[in-house]
Amino acid sequence: MKAEHVMHKARGLVVPILLLALWWVIAWNRWVSPLFLPSPEKVVATFLSLLGEGKIVANLGESLSKVVKGFLIGITAGFVLGLLMGLSRTAEKLLGPLFNAVRQVPILAWIPVLILVFGLTELAKLIFIALGALYPMTLNTFDGCRQLKREYLELARVFEYSRLRLLWRFTLPSALPSILAGLRVSLSEAWLLVIGAEIFFKTRGGLGDMMWEAKGKVRMDVVFITIIIIGLIGFLLNQTMTLLEKRLLRWRGTN
Amino acid sequence: MKKLMLDKASNLLLGLIIPILIVACMEMVSRLELTTSQLFVPPKLILETLIFLLKDGELLRNLGISFLRVTSGFLVGVTGGLVFGAAMGMSRKFEEYVGPLFHALRQIPVLAWIPLLILWIGIGEDFKVWFIAVTVFYPMALNACAGVKGVSKSYLEVGRVFDLGLLKRVSVIILPAALPSLFTGLRLSLSIAWMAVVGAELVAASEGVGYMMYRSRMQLQVDTVLVCIMAVGLTGYTMSLALGKIELFTLRWRRTDS
Amino acid sequence: MKTVFRALLTIGVLTTLLSGLGLAESKPKVIRIGCTGSNRPIPGNTFGILNQLGMLEAEFKKDNIKIEWNVFKGAGPASNEALANGAVDFVTFGDLPSIIGRAQGKIKFLAVHETRRAAYTIVQPDSKAKTIADLKGKKWGVSYGTAGHLYWSKLVDRAGLKEKDFKAVNFSGGDGKAAFLAKEIDALNVGTDVYDYISLGQAKVIYGTDQAPDLKGTAGLVVTEQFAKKYPEITYRFVKTYVRAAKLGSDPKNRAKTLTLWSNTGTSLSSLKKEYNKVPLALILDPVPDEYVISHLRDGIKFSKEKRIIRKDFDLNQWIDTSYLNRALKELKLEKYWPASDVNGTPTARR
């Protein structure tokens, strides 16, 4: 049983290892220009030197601070909006159509407008990131609110619970899985948009900017490094959220 | 019947309140010249610009180019994703071999592919199509994998009992059963494809609707930017509606079937 | 209800009082400047002199006014966005951005920042293109909304071609240069740093203002109408300091020092020397809008409207306000210092 498990995992490593070996061979023989494919050693060496210069930590910190700020703003707004629309049919009718219409527009299309209205400032970038976090959060909160089972609604009516009590004790808890899923999706959207903001808003600082500068100087090795770091952080953020989600849902017990 | 129509009408009106307020606000603020902020452009100007750009052909030309890019990239990426994802779903071994690498690469936010791809294939049409294809590949593959895996065991049993070959099994049993997931993947991929094309055109393009937005922004023409945004939103929406109709049609027989 | 009404009334009165107090202030706390720079946050021309010698800081030190320099990589368009957002008060930028800026908002053209601005079109060193027509269908890096855009538009027009004949890729900031060096595009429009490209073997020049001197650009100093109305004295003193800096740069005795200062923007000294050998610095830095400048701007406005870069026309005279400049020239006794140039750019002595 255990051996088979190990076999399964081992199979997963075959392809990556083969690719790495292929990469090393190609670079060693210079079959492809080093501008296109830097050798693995060079990538590691550049990584270590950048780490030493503190550039990686600085840019990483910059991007992380953006994602946290934008994420928090976005999920708060998204939560409020989703709650409003989920709880009040009137609100849904008032805001829903506009929200859905705006949702049709790919979020990147808002960049030129944001730049024109807010300039190339931190504020513009934060709004952009927050917008990205807002959509999934609103949708999920809205969905969650609507999930309240009829029986509970009936129960609350029979016991003549106040609206607030209904909200706190019934609606929100049953909406929790959706809301938590929304948080997870919002976070990965926010991370994606932080990189986007740093590329499209073209100001200094952050991993996206580091990557773009490297592209400008045709430093493929730095581009590789930044991509890997960005992916890694995205993965870690996602895992953290998933863990949080599982924890909170477990505490809630089965429903 | 009458109540239903009244309901629908009142819903429509309610939904229009806020947009109308916004338009009125923009008109007032720009008329009174309260601020130089670019946000408050007179709605009439937006309309004029829209009409001009349509007559001029610029809007449709650029929209058409973006549309072509989206379609090409979409087709390439979705096909790749479908094949790859289905293979992962059908063969445990395949999934074990490629799974970890697949999921690892999936962590990379799509926009991070832009610099890499530009360095590898320049900034021509190829770049845009491949970029869209790459962004669309993942959601499609994931949904295809989930769809294939979700095929009811009893269906697969039938295939085994009738001793169907691989091709027959896939086309007659697996694909149809996986269709709902596949369509979810297609819908998701479509909106991602539009995001990708706008992104690519904001960075390295000489035509297309994203390019039009970028250029207008540099020339401080908010009205043109807004027209482009509406055009993109509308086109994307129409395409997803069309996709929805296709989905309904293909799934219709399925509902009566199961 | 009554309490609400009273509360609103109090708030209303208080805000009016406070804003009244604000109006009574005759000095801003900070003067915000916007300009263009490339890799290093240092502008060129007169602003470069002002910035590096700290002349504005010295002038306004006694009033406790800070000077905030915003040097934009995004050039003219970025300055325009900042103006629209009320983020800056004084800006220098090229002819097209200033025309776009005026067509969109309320700015006053105070003085000239640079005339006879050179521009060149470069291609890849191994390119076989010899004329503009050879570049048909090729990728050409253009930064829309900048002075380079006007140069390019006029150039295409003059070659009898259309913008659609080329694949004009839009870039902002230094992306054009990066794309050119990475060989992603075939042609690019550049300015005074052209000789750096040539000396490093990175490009060939196939056209430029050397062949077509009327494609040379003009840059100007503008201020927001709001700032000028609120702080006319400050605006005047700013212009005065500006003129002093222009004189420093125009003085042939300071030539070497001026060029060295400008080399801090990132363009090499040798490239600057080659470029500024062609025209005396005094003509370039001449802050007075003479016939040459005015006819150039008038043409620019007409051309921009034709090409639908701007929608509404505007009156040149409403836009240019030389009252501050003239007062400064008088006070500094520099009225006759700079020669006035006629429509063709030929300098004649000032009457």
Image: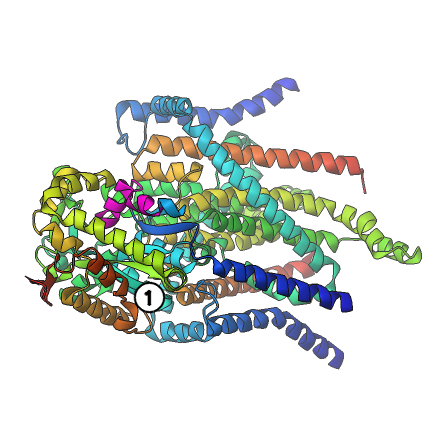
- Name the side, left or right, on which C83 lies relative to A1: left
Residue depicted at 73% across the width and 76% down the height? B4
Whether residue A126 can be seen here: yes
Magenta-span inclusion, residue C223: no
Mark 1: which secondary structure? helix
Residue position for label 1 = C102
Question: Is B142 drawn above or below residue B220 in the view shown?
Answer: above
Q: Nearer the viewer, residue C283 or B121?
A: C283
- Magenta: main secondary structure equals helix
Indicate the position of residue B242 as horizontal and vertical percent values.
53, 64
Q: Nearer the viewer, residue B98 or A34?
A: A34
Q: Residue furthest bottom?
A: B2
Q: Residue furthest top?
A: A3
- Name the side, left or right, on which C325 lies relative to A122: left
Residue depicted at 13% across the width and 42% down the height? C254
The residue under label 1 is which amino acid type?
A: Arg
Q: From the image, which quarter does the N terminus of chain A lie in?
A: top right
Magenta-span inclusion, residue C47: yes
Q: Quadrant of residue A222?
A: top left
| Magenta-drawn segment | C39-60
